[in-house]
Image (spheres, helix red, strand yellow):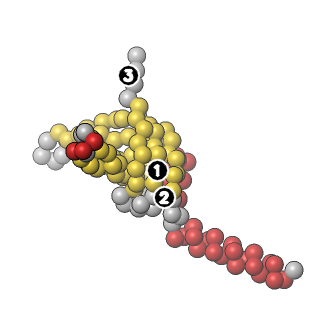
Amino acid sequence: MNNLAQIILDGNLTVDPECRKTSKGKTVTNIRIATNHEWGESQNRKKGVSFFLIECWGTLAENCDKYLTKGSKITAQGELREDRWKDKAGKTHSRIKVVAHSVRFDATKKKEETVVDEEEEDKQELKVEEAA
């Protein structure tokens, strides 16, 4: 029986997405987000920030790479996974990441190439309207 390790995170990208292809040709994109949180009683509230690595695969990975940039606000749902590896000295390392099932783009800034493409489309539309 599998145990449940689901998580939902709401935050902002701290850097642009990092997209790559695996040796088998699958697309994987890593996004790093910061989430703000508060704790304590009402008069002594404290604020903090936590940082998370979110791993996306396939079409989701392609869309995250295409539409997200540093500062984009997202909500990600996925499952917690632990990566474990040994370095050259034989020391064991581990890290917890979220493997995303879905990512909602709450407030995105399109990457420059996409914005340029839209500007080109607008220019083309204007040319068509002027010709008509």
Mark 1 crowd level (few <14, some 14–19, many ≥20, 10 Å Cα):
some
What's the CA distance linking mark 3 and mark 2? Answer: 31 Å
Q: Is residue 93 left or right of residue 20?
A: left
| Residue 14 in sight in this render | yes
Q: Is residue 52 left or right of residue 124?
A: left
**What's the amino acid at mark 3?**
Asn
First in sequence, mark 3 or 2: give its number.
Answer: 3
Residue visible at 34% across and 41% down in the picture = 97
Circle 1 or circle 2, nearest the eye: 1
Q: Is residue 15 left or right of residue 100?
A: left
The total number of labels drawn is: 3
Q: Which residue in the structure is indicated by mark 1?
A: 74
Residue visible at 75% across and 75% down in the picture = 125
Q: Which residue in the structure is indicated by mark 3?
A: 3
Q: Is residue 82 left or right of residue 57?
A: left
Which of the labelled discs sits on residue 68, or is there none?
A: 2
Residue 88 percent coordinates (x, y): 16, 47
Determine the image quadrant of residue 128: bottom right
**What's the amino acid at mark 1?**
Ile
Determine the image quadrant of residue 69: bottom left
| Residue 85 in sight in this render | no
Circle 3 or circle 1, nearest the eye: 1
What's the CA distance linking mark 1 and mark 2? Answer: 9 Å
